[in-house]
Image: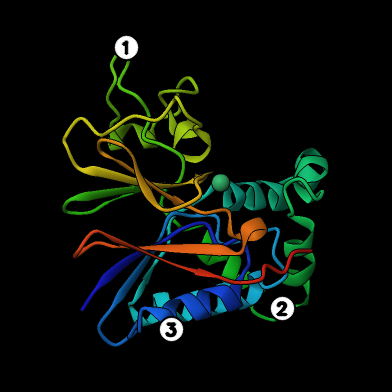
Amino acid sequence: MASYVLGDLHGQARILESLLKSVRFDPKVDILYSVGDVIDRGTETVEALEFLYEGARSGWFFPLLGNHEELLIAYLKDPKRHGTGYLDSGFGGGVTVDALEKSPKSDELLKWIASWPLVLPLDSLILVHGALPRIRQSIWGDPDLCSKRVESSTGFHSCLWARPPEIYPSYDQRTVISGHNIVPEGQTYRPGIILIDTGCYRTGRLTLYRMEDRSFHSVQGKPRCG
Ligand SMILES: [Mn+2]
């Protein structure tokens, strides 16, 4: 039995399939977490969502919200206000919205996405897409602050959008594992912080972190973007 954390997928279902094959992921005994940004940019977002939704229902997949999922939810609530930024190729939301419109499961999938948590505290790890919000005037982050909306570096905005140097280790010594900020290889970015977004949508490189032996696993594929 092994527990894995998946870096930003951005709609690359085929590369995910080959990565899971490469580690011999077994849905009967293994578990997969995500650091968010499953959707957008890629042309296989709906395939990825359907596969992972089945995983969540079967108990082997545990999602986390990324800034792209938050934008999709905001866009659908108020398309006029969020359309221009979200739909264009910079964010790559247009390809997701088009594909969801054609999917008979879209309502179910969207309801599911809206339920994804902003932070996932586990025994020895804390999963958050961007970074933990910072405890005021300190160099430490706190997962409990994710549920509070205060200024940008101390509220949930940080969980979804933070960029270095605004990323902080957890005050309680649990290792924080995040996506969002692209690195060439999965790595300990600084003590207490692991980054695993290897920019799959443009590099084709997708990365998993295995908790049990603290190892990184990647495959190189060909990204398909809209
Ligand atoms: Mn992101």
Eye-nearest disc, 1 or 3? 3
Amino acid type assigned to the residue bearing label 1 in the image = Gln
Check disc 2: other Cα within 10 Å, few if <14, some if 14-19, many if 20+: few
Amino acid type assigned to the residue bearing label 3 in the image = Lys
Closer to the chain start, of discs 3 and 2, is 3
In the picture, measured across the screen, residue 99 lies left or right of residue 142, that is right
Rendering quarter of residue 203 = bottom right
Nearer the observer, 29 or 98: 29
Where is 80 relative to 63, above or below? above
Q: How many marks?
A: 3
Residue 166 position within the rendered picture, expressed as x and y whole percent measured from the top left: 44, 25
Q: Residue at x 50, y 40 (%)?
A: 160
Q: Residue at x 47, y 29 (%)?
A: 164
Eye-nearest disc, 1 or 2? 1
Distance of mark 1 from mark 3, alpha carbons? 45 Å
Q: Which residue is mark 2?
A: 103
Closer to the chain start, of discs 1 and 2, is 2
- The numbered dot on residue 137 is 1
Q: Are marks 3 and 2 in contact (CB under 8 Å)?
A: no
Eye-nearest disc, 3 or 2? 3
